[in-house]
Image (cartoon, rainbow, N blue to C red):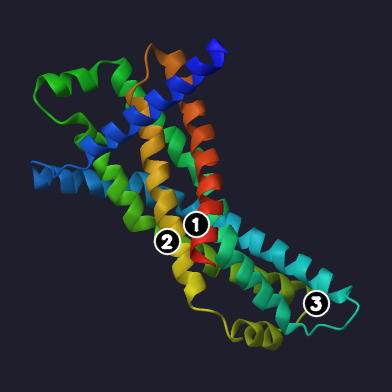
C-alpha cells in the first residue's frame, strides 16, 4: 500500500514539475532576434527534416488503405461503386492517420531528438551555465520548439493527406482496379468541412505534447549518457500514451 501511494505521489510531483516547466518556458523572450533565429532552426530540425518521412509513410499508407477499401467493398453483400474507394480513403486519412498516427510516429523521431538534445545539455552542465548567466533556460530551450511545432505540424498534416490520396490514386492507376475518373469522383463527394478543423486541432494539441513532454524528461535528466538514453525512451513512451489518451478525449469533445 505504501508503495502504491509513493508511486501516486511521484506521478503527481512529476505532473506538477511539468506544468511549472511549461509555465517558465511560455514567458515572453527577452531577445527577439535570438528567439527568432532559434525558432527558425527548430522549424528545420523538427519539421522540415520530417517531411520526407511523413511523405513516404503517407504515400504507401494511402495506397494500402485504398486497396483495403476496394477489397472490402468488393466483398460486400450489396455492390458499392468504385468511387467510394477514394472517399473512404480520404476520410480515414483526414480523421485519423494524418493527424494521430503521424504524430505517434513523430513522437518517436522528434521526441527522442528533443529529449536527447536537452538531456545532453543537462548532463554536460550547459543548462547550469545558462542559469548562471541569468538566462531563462526553459524559455530559451523549449519555447522555440513549441512555436516551431505549432507552426509546422499543420503543414505536415496537409502534406500527409495529399500524399496519401496520391498513393491511393497511384496504386489504382498501376493495378487498374479502379479508374482515375472514379477516384476523382469519390474525392469530390460531400465531406464535412469540420473534419479538417477537428484534425488540425488534434494536430496542434499533439504538436504541443511532442514538444513539451520530451523536453521535460530531457530537462530533468540526472546522470550521464546512459541516463540520457533511458530518458529519451521514457519520453517517447509517455508522449505516445498521452497522444492516444488525448485522441480519445478530443474525439469525444469535438465530434459529439
**Image location (x, y in percent) of residue 104:** 54, 46
Asked if residue 27 is positioned above or below residue 156 in the image, the reply reads above
The Cα–Cα distance between marks 3 and 1, rounded to whole angstroms, is 36 Å
Identify the residue position indicated by label 3 in the image. Answer: 177
Identify the element where label 2 is drawn. Answer: helix
- The number of numbered discs placed on residues in the rendered structure image is 3
Indicate the quadrant where residue 124 lies. Answer: top left
Q: CA distance from mark 2 to mark 3?
A: 35 Å
Mark 3 Cα shell of 10 Å, populated few (<14), some (14-19), many (≥20): few
Q: Specify few, some or many for label 1: CA neighbours under 10 Å numbering under 14, 14-19, or 20 or more.
A: some
Is the C-beta separation of discs 2 and 1 under 8 Å? yes
Q: Nearer the viewer, mark 3 or mark 1?
A: 1
Q: Is residue 180 above or below residue 46?
A: below
| Relative side of 237 to 40, left or right | right
**Which badge, 2 or 3, comes first in the chain's sequence?**
3
Query: Badge 2: few (under 14), some or many (20 or more) residues near its Cα, within 10 Å?
Result: some
Disc number at residue 250? 1
Q: Which residue is mark 2?
A: 201
Instruction: Indicate which label's residue lies in the foreground, 2 or 3.
Output: 2
Residue 114 visible in the snapshot: no
Q: Nearer the viewer, residue 212 or 130?
A: 212
Q: Residue at x 10, y 47 (%)?
A: 32
State the image coordinates of residue 234 (x, y, percent, origin top left). 50, 27
Which quadrant of the figure contains the N terminus? Answer: top right
Residue appearing at x 56%, y 46% in the figure: 244
Relative to 178, is 140 on the left or the right?
A: left
Rendered location of residue 168, percent (x, y)? 67, 70
Mark nearer the N terminus (2 vs 1): 2
Q: Is the residue under label 1 in contact with that under label 3 (CB below 8 Å)?
A: no
User: Where, quadrant-wise, is the C terminus in this rendering?
Assistant: bottom right
Q: Quadrant of residue 73?
A: bottom right
Given residues 202 and 62, the one toward you in this image is 202
Amino acid at each position: 500500500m505504501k508503495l502504491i501511494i509513493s508511486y501516486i505521489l511521484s506521478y503527481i510531483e512529476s505532473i506538477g514539475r511539468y506544468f511549472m516547466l511549461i509555465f517558465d518556458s511560455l514567458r515572453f523572450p527577452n531577445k527577439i532576434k535570438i528567439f527568432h533565429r532559434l525558432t527558425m532552426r527548430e522549424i528545420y530540425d523538427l519539421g522540415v527534416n520530417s517531411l520526407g518521412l511523413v511523405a513516404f509513410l503517407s504515400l504507401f499508407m494511402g495506397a494500402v488503405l485504398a486497396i483495403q477499401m476496394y477489397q472490402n467493398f468488393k466483398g460486400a453483400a450489396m455492390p458499392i461503386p468504385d468511387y467510394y474507394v477514394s472517399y473512404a480513403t480520404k476520410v480515414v486519412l483526414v480523421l485519423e492517420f494524418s493527424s494521430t498516427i503521424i504524430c505517434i510516429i513523430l513522437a518517436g523521431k522528434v521526441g527522442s531528438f528533443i529529449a536527447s538534445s536537452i538531456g545532453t545539455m543537462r548532463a554536460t552542465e550547459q543548462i547550469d551555465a545558462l542559469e548562471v548567466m541569468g538566462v531563462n533556460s526553459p524559455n530559451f530551450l523549449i519555447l522555440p520548439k513549441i512555436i516551431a511545432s505549432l507552426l509546422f505540424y499543420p503543414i505536415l498534416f496537409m502534406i500527409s493527406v495529399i500524399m496519401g490520396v496520391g498513393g491511393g490514386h497511384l496504386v489504382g492507376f498501376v493495378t487498374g482496379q479502379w479508374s482515375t475518373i472514379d477516384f476523382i469522383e469519390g474525392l469530390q463527394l460531400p465531406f464535412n468541412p469540420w473534419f479538417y478543423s477537428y484534425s488540425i486541432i488534434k494536430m496542434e494539441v499533439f504538436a504541443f505534447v511532442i514538444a513539451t513532454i520530451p523536453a521535460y524528461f530531457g530537462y530533468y535528466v540526472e546522470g550521464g549518457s546512459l541516463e540520457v538514453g533511458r530518458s529519451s525512451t521514457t519520453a517517447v513512451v509517455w508522449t505516445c500514451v498521452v497522444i492516444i489518451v488525448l485522441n480519445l478525449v478530443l474525439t469525444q469533445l469535438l465530434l459529439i
